Amino acid sequence: MLLLVMDTSSAVVTAAVHDGDTVVGHAVEHGAQAHGELLAPVIERALADAGARPSDLTDVCAGVGPGPFTGLRVGVVTARVMGEALGIPVHGICSLDVLAFQAFVESGFALDRLAVAADARRKEVYLRVYGRGARPASDPAVLKPADVDAEVAAGVVVGPGAWLYPDAFPGRAEPRELDGAAMAELVAARLQTGGDLLPPEPLYLRRPDAVENAQRKRVTPS
């Protein structure tokens, strides 16, 4: 196995390479408005770090969000294009699952429950709740922080959304950012054990800010 993962669901643009045993390449950049410009160099650096070329890859995986429309599709489309060009399988994974996995690993898998909150803009968060072992206990949702279940909001909440709205999430905790290396570990484990991976389709949860105006203009004869 030589797996390439990438994620552009947030302000962090990251990629990592896993050889089936360990992470052998990793790169990251920050740029909320520059996903398209940053992702290709990040992938190149991760591959160079691993001493690998694109033709060496056996699988590619993109974080499918949820996340903002423009940034999220950069990673998903790039993964799909690479998979098509190289003739290898393309997978997806919920980006919130990666943050939950990071939190459970850092706690020694001692947590019984946590939530992950990501920035959904419009003063909202993407939220998902997890039980022991980072197992999802809810579907991803987009909510205003004030509308999050009080018990969930008062518990352990990780991710950038928790730190963006500290008054709404008093139990906020690390990690704040998705780590590409952790993503590679999680995806590799799921590939090896037949765990749950998703199709490479973005999880938008809502329509983009810019939408086509479906209302036809009336043309008045002259």
Image (spheres, rainbow, N blue to C red):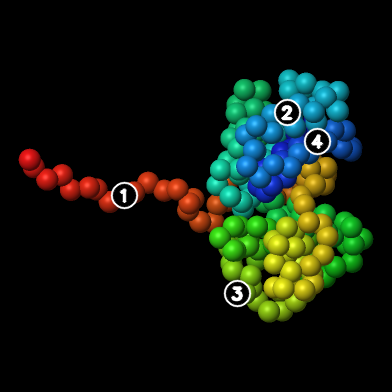
Q: Quadrant of residue 82?
A: top right
Q: Position of residue 136 (x, y in %)?
A: 71, 62
CA–CA distance in space, label 3 to label 1: 31 Å
Identify the secondary structure beneath mark 3: helix
The amino acid on which the numbered mark 1 sits, given as a three-letter code, is Ala
CB atoms of marks 4 and 1 within 8 Å? no
Q: Nearer the viewer, residue 58 or 10?
A: 10
User: Which residue is depicted at the point 73% across and 64% down?
Assistant: 162
Identify the secondary structure beneath mark 4: strand
CA–CA distance in space, label 4 to label 2: 9 Å
Q: Where residue 41 is drawn, which disc sits there? A: 2
State which tag comes first along the sequence, 4 or 2.
4
Disc 4 target residue: 27
Q: For the image shown, how many numbered marks are present on the structure?
A: 4
Q: Where residue 147 is drawn, which disc sits there? A: 3
User: Which residue is depicted at the point 76% across and 50% down?
Assistant: 178
The amino acid on which the numbered mark 4 sits, given as a three-letter code, is Ala
Q: Residue furthest bottom?
A: 150
* Residue 199 seen in this snapshot: no
Q: Residue furthest front?
A: 222
User: Which residue is depicted at the point 80% across and 28% down?
Assistant: 45
Q: Position of residue 81 (x, y in %)?
A: 60, 28
CA–CA distance in space, label 4 to label 1: 42 Å
State which tag comes first along the sequence, 4 or 1.
4
Q: Residue furthest left?
A: 222
Disc 1 target residue: 214
